[in-house]
Amino acid sequence: MHRPRRRGSRRGRPLFVVTLRGALIWGIFGVALLLSILISRGIITPAGARGPLQGQIVYIDPGHGGIDPGACGKKYLEKDIALNVALYLGVRLQKSGAKVVYTRTGDYDLETAEVDDLTARLRLMKSSKATIVISIHCNAFTSPYERGAQTFYNASGHPGSKKLAALIQEELVKETGTDREISARLDHFILNHATVPAVTVELGFLSNPSEEDLLGSPSYQQKLAECIYRGVLKYVNRGV
Ligand SMILES: [Zn+2]
């Protein structure tokens, strides 16, 4: 049955519907925009989303810890700087979808009554099913003039190690001004036993007073972590 429309009855209702729809659209648009900004800045990782490092398991080994301080500067200890950079790096990697396995997240070593520290680190590396291995240390030398971050790899290890080292070093050169090049000279227990791409990053020299100050600063530690992160990201994106 056709009923003649009443004049005036259309005016009020459509206006309300249009306003409600507009508010909904703008609301959804606003939330989507906010989410995209947060995701792009790495502040949140969307559940179930494939981050650029999804599927990667990164084993991060901050050297030393507990009774073993590593190299000692006048103000800072290697074990503390390595740990801070490792934690900054781990958070960065996790935000990009990687799973991170740390050998330590505090000031302790891994020695137990049954197993020594190095063996425990190696066992953890094997059981972690890591796809990438990163060991973090600081350097020291008799001369106070030696300086600069440097990335090491094992030439007889996984063929991807050299490429990963080169990509990390590229970032370190760009961001910290180090003039050092990658090297295969370091004889390191983690690198020697890794069967996946593996590097050791020597963050700098604690025996150099000005570099020691840099290494002790949280902003420089974050910068170093960011360099390692970008190197890993480029390595995974490019493949070998
Ligand atoms: Zn060390």
Image (cartoon, rainbow, N blue to C red):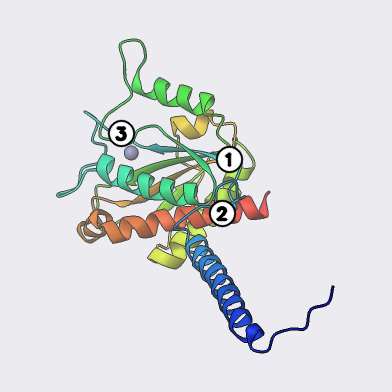
Q: Residue at x 29, y 27 (%)?
A: 109
In space, the residues marked 2 and 1 are separated at their CA atoms by 13 Å
- Residue 216: image location, x then y, percent: 23, 54
Residue placed under numbered mark 2 in the picture: 233
Callout 3 environment at 10 Å: few (<14), some (14 to 19), or many (20+)?
Answer: many
Direction from residue 213 to residue 121 in the image, left or right: right
Q: Is residue 139 visible?
A: no
Tell whether label 3 touches label 2 (CB within 8 Å): no
User: Which comes before the other along the chain, label 3 or label 1?
Assistant: 3
**Of callouts 2 and 3, which one flags the residue occurring earlier in the amino acid sequence?**
3
Label 3 near ligand 1 (CB < 8 Å): yes
Query: Residue at the spot x=31%, y=15% of the render?
Result: 112
- Asked whether 189 or 39 is in front, the reply is 39
> Circle 1: is it few (<14), some (14-19), or many (20+) Cα within 10 Å?
many
Q: Name the amino acid, label 2.
A: Leu
Q: Residue 184: image x %, image y %?
A: 51, 43
Mark toward the start of the polypeptide (2 vs 1): 1
Q: Position of residue 114 (x, y in %)?
A: 35, 10
Residue identified by numbered label 3:
64
Give amino acid for label 3: His
